[in-house]
């Protein structure tokens, strides 16, 4: 029983948009008869008995309950008779600047909504308070409560995208200002991986919102649909931002690659230049190190300093030539 | 009140396509009863009270007003009852040859149109004057006013595209005529980024125009639809130009990359050639620098000049060989 | 007759979800008249006479029987009058960590289901037992039996995907921590090939499940469809995992490529550094090996140790310079 | 008036497929009443007054006339009431083997067709003659005249594609038989650019032809539609050829790139081989150039020739080794 | 007349699925009145008069006949009134392991089928015999004859795909086991080209089969459609095999590219290693070749062998170090 208390975060009945009472799960059925009211239950990592009870109270389908228990679902919207089962993935930037993914499931009926949080995500009590402070909206029914929570979930993606876009810009700065390194290659790869993960979490929401705002779902009343269009709009924007980032990241990768090759060119040029500057005196010295009997230069009084000066001069000329043509 | 005056650029009533009067916002409702007339309001970065007033005058939806206030929306078209809410992104080349993005929102009703400019963009007073000088067109109603402004916004994309295409051509010239450089890689990347931005601003307009010119929107009268088809046509053309530029830029990137590798080949060849020309005399000199007792050449009278000449000759031959095979 | 016994794994009649009797194939027709019952037959690599008999008992189409005999089909769902013919590919990780593909075919009629296994795959007796222990579900008819087997087949993909994702992670670790090698290139390629194979096996199932859960197939009763939606959900998830892995693998390939180029840069730099450190003393030694009569240094008492020390000092300086700039 | 005469290439009335009379534009209206006849007008780069006159004669829409005047449109098909406005791009290979793009616009009504050529393209007089020589076809009306001209325009793409495919083959030959060069990289890029241009001109025609051959356009009579399907078929073929060429060009680019890298390998190998062959004698010579008091070899009678022979032998062995392993 | 005899391979009338008579083309019309029968004509590269005659006998459309004469069409299915015109491309592996493309056209009517072969392809007499030996199938009408020939054409793609997949595997083996070469790059490119060609031939068949098996074509009777679904199934399988091969080939190209770069790394490392092993003794020898008066080592009795041994020792150490780190 204690675990049930732990996992049931909130369970309240509403009438005309106003909270009537906090109720224990077993008394739910009494409140379901009120035609203007609904019940809103918030669970967190519920155990099997709690889910079983919920299932019995609202006559939910075995398959949906199984999904809700196992978690690790992909985002989806399924209708079971006149109940909707919805799975949404939540995101959060944790302290270590990493993305934590969570999952929230919803059961939506004519006069009830159950939200089930799994894994890391903020609690929805703040959303609930905001709703309760606007009874003229909340009286639209459980569909509006669904909107409020989904809106808050989707808004949670924006800081994540901002973080990723920020990283992309840092990376970009780094690629073009520093020397190419294993580190920046690794970062490009890591950023790509996380974009793929976020994309996988957000993109199914487009379809889901389209269905929520347009289709013949009686559960979402006419006047609540514009709200889901608002969520849809945010989802599409997040999705576009992810796509743009992916495309730009692709270009960054290619630019990185070009710069690696360019830097190879520069190393080659530098090496070639210095090899010449060292090679020429070595050659000259070799020549005057030959042991021929008749090498007049060797006997000249100023032979040594002249040859040495000419060689140094040659090196200086080479140095300047290479400098001018950008090889050094 | 002063801020309202600042943000209300223009507010006028029209009957039969002719301007009747400039009116303050609070008197709007009086003019809305005229079945042949409409009200055209132009706002710039309005504050909340002004938007609140507008909302009340025309009974606009909370969500739309919120969007209109926050700006930074993606281009979209939404129907709220019998009002249309439209968001379009505007572009402009500024003095520093950079693209400034702005945003314009529209509320379109049976007998009113409100345009709300955000960020950098030209004022629409010129468009309004042009419309007023053609009352036979403007009498088609607020739908025509919408067309006029949207047409002017879309036409604003052409100079931007021209600028980008011009840059692409300069870049192309540079890639093929100059040596590969970090600079041209950076430019390719920057151009790509801006193309992605423009693409994101223009491509949602295709769908929006399709809906404006075809769908069962009563707000756009039959005879105004061909005008939106004209806008559609421009949007599609801009979109195609962006796509072509992106594709060509992709090829430019690949060409750039091939040229970097080719230039690496050339550096290698040159280096190898000169290494041989320096290495051969060094080797010969080394041989005649050996200290064997019995090296007859060393004692020949012409040993030194002969060996020197032969070596120089060898170098010349090598030089010519390398020259002929394109290594030098 | 013996081969028939071999290939007929199981043949039983069910009424109201309970197994009534194991029956020989020739007695099937007697049991087909029961309106609440159905026959469930499990075959493994059947020979032609057995298939012929099955065809006659259930009046199956020539083309379907031919397909069922030949195997090596692509996954598909075909309707022949009021019989469904379904082909699904099965996967399994064998002892050598390789993927074995198999194939299972189904004939589904109003009151019968025939499953035909080809190649390597687990037997379905376990699935059958599980079904028999839940008669309230199995009484939904042969459609539920189909679901049970398909669900078990699709669940068989998860360990395969896990294996491949595990390999991808190992590969990733390897690419970024070890030196680039032919081996990791080969592994990337092999992983890609297997992902292509799995993709080809799983992706047609999306369409098939959509048809099973939605369309006007009378054979799948209303209350069985949610179960196929569950299979659909798993199929979509597997498909997405394959797609993500493919995309990430693509990035891994590009990262691998960048790292190969970077490692080329490092080799070049190292080589250049050491060449300089060896080249400088060689040059100095060459100079003092010249045979000029008048080289005062040669006659100094400390000439040799001084020159030697200076040269070694130069090498040390060079070494430190290269070290600092990351070339060594 | 003179310019009008210049720009009006041909203006004739037809009845039952036979040319009745060449008529001046101002007399058109008289001929429009004939229910079995139509008027066919051919213009070339018309000035504004001519277009104005045409507009008045046939009551054409302002927007269409504006487009027809400005040219530089994208290919499109627009309906204005019961008039069709069609824009098609024409191509031609000019003397310098370059592609010249032109533009032809059509106005098609119940009993008239106006074709307006812009920029470089062949005149359509030949097409007109061919039509006039087949009155049984031409009597199908102005739709058939439209077909005849469009067919001739689309056929004009084939030589262009042939030219481009020819270039691709030459390029291919060059890439695989010659050494990689800046020139072939430039050619790949240029070919790509032109393919993008042609693609942009031809691909909108697919949609246009689909509409002409299928939709509820009364202007194209039932028995003329198969002819547009023929045009459609050609357009699809051209489009496919462009797509194939683009794909193959992409592979050519990648092959080119691989060959550049391979050629780098070869340069490296060659350089390494020759460096060894020069380096070994240099080393040996250095050793026997040392000034030790006790170097017995130096005093041997045959020391010099023996060392020289051994060294040359070593070089020969190295040369053969490198030759065998493909490094030289 | 002789050419007609050459090009008419077979012309026979069938009733109830049985061959009644071989008939000359001019007598066809007599047999067309039989409601249970049909005429099946097989042509090979027919000349114009033959096609003219066929056209007259069956009232075929000018455009279709023109296409049938010119050949070099893309695969397509066109309806002309109640006649179908079908173009399919045939493939064959010739003696030189190359793909020969041919073309077969069909005219299908209520009671006739005409097949026209162009270019290299097997004759269809074998198919015809097989059909004639199964009159219970052939009595389904000319639609079944169409199926039989199309099935045989599509089956002809399998050996081609097998050949290409075989080549891909050989190539793969070669890339990973041999050194990168121009040859393997060329082979990748060639294989890609051929896959593009096969893709272009097979992919339009998907759509064609879909129309044949599903649409409201009266010409294909209800009970013949499953047969076209069978063809469809094969076409989809071939198409998938081509797509997989293309994707794998793309990966092979990238792997090839990585291996070229890796082999560059290896060449560099080897070169660097040997350069060091030759460079160190050269440097040492240079030092002891200096002409200083006071170089005590030179006068030591064992100076020479000691220095020589130390140097050789150094080289051995270097060799072992390089060996261990994989540079040699």
Image (cartoon, coloured by chain):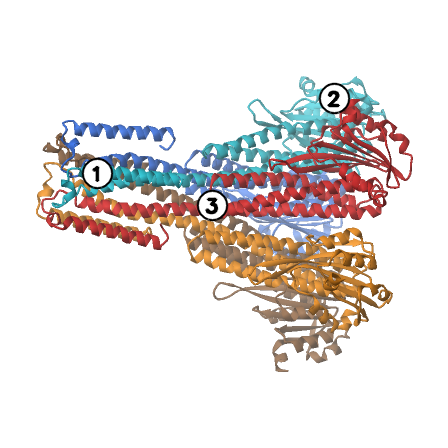
Chain colours: A cyan, B red, C blue, D orange, E brown
Quadrant hosting residue E320:
top left
E9 sits to left or right of D52: left
Q: Earlier in the sequence, mark 1 or mark 2?
A: 2
Q: Is residue B74 visible?
A: yes
How far from the left and from the top, in percent, is residue C23?
67, 48
Dividing the picture into quarters, in which one does residue E258 lie? top left
Q: Residue furthest bottom?
A: E1
Q: Is residue C113 left or right of residue D1?
A: left
Q: Nearer the viewer, residue C195 or D96?
A: D96
Q: Nearer the viewer, residue B300 or A85?
A: B300
Eye-nearest disc, 1 or 3: 1
Q: Residues within 10 Å of mark 1 (few under 14, many from 20)?
A: few
* Secondary element type, mark 1: helix
Residue C162 on image: x %, y %: 55, 37
Residue placed under numbered mark 1 in the picture: A306
Specify the subunit that label 1 lies on: A
Q: Nearer the viewer, residue D22 or D141?
A: D22
Give me the C-alpha separation between circle 1 and circle 3: 41 Å
Indicate the chain on which mark 2 is placed. Answer: A
Which structural element holds mark 2?
A: helix
Image quarter for residue E101? bottom right
Residue to which mark 3 is pinned? B178
For this rendering, which residue is in front, B165 or C109? Answer: B165
């Amino acid at each position: 029983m204690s675990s049930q208390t732990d996992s049931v975060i909130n369970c309240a009945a509403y009438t005309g948009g106003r909270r009537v009472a906090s109720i224990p799960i077993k008394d739910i059925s009494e409140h379901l008869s009120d035609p203007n009211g609904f019940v809103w239950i918030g669970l967190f990592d519920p155990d099997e008995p709690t889910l079983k009870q919920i299932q019995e109270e609202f006559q939910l389908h075995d398959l949906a309950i199984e999904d809700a228990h196992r978690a690790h679902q992909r985002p989806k919207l399924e209708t079971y008779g006149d109940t909707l089962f919805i799975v949404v993935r939540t995101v959060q930037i944790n302290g270590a600047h990493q993305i934590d993914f969570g999952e929230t499931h919803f059961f939506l009926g004519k006069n009830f909504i159950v939200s089930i949080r799994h894994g890391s995500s903020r609690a929805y009590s703040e959303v609930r308070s905001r709703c309760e402070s606007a009874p003229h909206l909340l009286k639209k029914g459980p569909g509006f409560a669904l909107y409020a929570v989904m809106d808050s979930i989707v808004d949670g993606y924006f800081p994540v995208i901002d973080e990723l876009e920020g990283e992309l810009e840092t990376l970009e700065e780094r690629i073009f200002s520093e020397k190419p390194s294993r580190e920046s290659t690794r970062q490009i790869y890591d950023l790509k991986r996380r974009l793929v993960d976020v994309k996988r979490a957000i993109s199914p929401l487009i379809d889901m919102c389209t269905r929520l705002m347009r289709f013949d779902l009686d559960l979402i009343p006419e006047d609540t649909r514009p709200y889901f269009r608002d969520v849809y709009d945010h989802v599409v924007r997040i999705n576009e931002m992810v796509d743009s980032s992916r495309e730009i990241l692709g270009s960054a990768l290619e630019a990185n690659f070009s710069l690696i090759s360019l830097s190879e060119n520069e190393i080659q040029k530098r090496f070639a230049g210095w090899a010449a500057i060292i090679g020429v005196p070595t050659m000259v010295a070799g020549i005057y190190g030959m042991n021929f009997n008749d090498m007049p230069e060797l006997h000249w009084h100023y032979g040594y300093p002249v040859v040495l000066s000419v060689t140094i001069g040659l090196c200086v000329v080479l140095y300047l030539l290479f400098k001018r043509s950008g090889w050094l």
